Image (cartoon, helix red, strand yellow):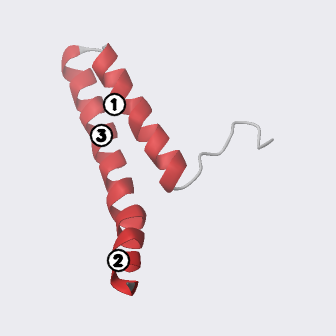
Amino acid sequence: MIWNFARKIILTAILVPLGAAGARKLSDTIERRRGASRGTRFLRQGADTLQNTFGRKKRSRFGFR
């Protein structure tokens, strides 16, 4: 029981942010080679959503939130 809980914590704490970083890096690489497209935009938005959900929160520009 506790191992299942630990596995969930490890997945959300380590693997999800790494996946988000990988998706963002892939999006940057594809945009550099071929230019911006719908697919690269979705990759970047998905990475941002994952990072906001599981990772560190992005700071707003003026610090109101």
Q: Looking at the rendering, in which quadrant would you find the N terminus?
A: bottom left
Q: Residue 60: give x, y in percent of width and height.
A: 68, 39
**Residue named by callout 1:** 43
Question: Which of the two discs, 2 and 1, labels the residue nearer the N terminus?
Answer: 2
**Which element type, helix, strand or loop, lies under badge 2?**
helix
Residue at the extreme bottom of the image, as rendered? 2
Q: Amino acid at mark 2?
A: Asn
Assess whether mark 3 and mark 1 are in contact (beta carbons under 8 angstroms). Answer: yes
Q: Looking at the rendering, in which quadrant would you find the C terminus?
A: top right
Q: Residue 30: give x, y in percent of width and height.
A: 22, 25
Q: Amino acid at mark 1?
A: Leu
Q: Is residue 11 left or right of residue 34?
A: right
Distance from Cα at disc 2 to Cα at disc 3: 27 Å
Distance from Cα at disc 1 to Cα at disc 3: 6 Å
Q: Given this view, does label 2 or label 1 mark the residue nearer the observer?
A: 2
**Residue named by callout 2:** 4
Q: Residue 14: give x, y in percent of width and height.
A: 36, 65
Residue at the extreme right of the image, as rendered? 64
**Residue named by callout 3:** 23
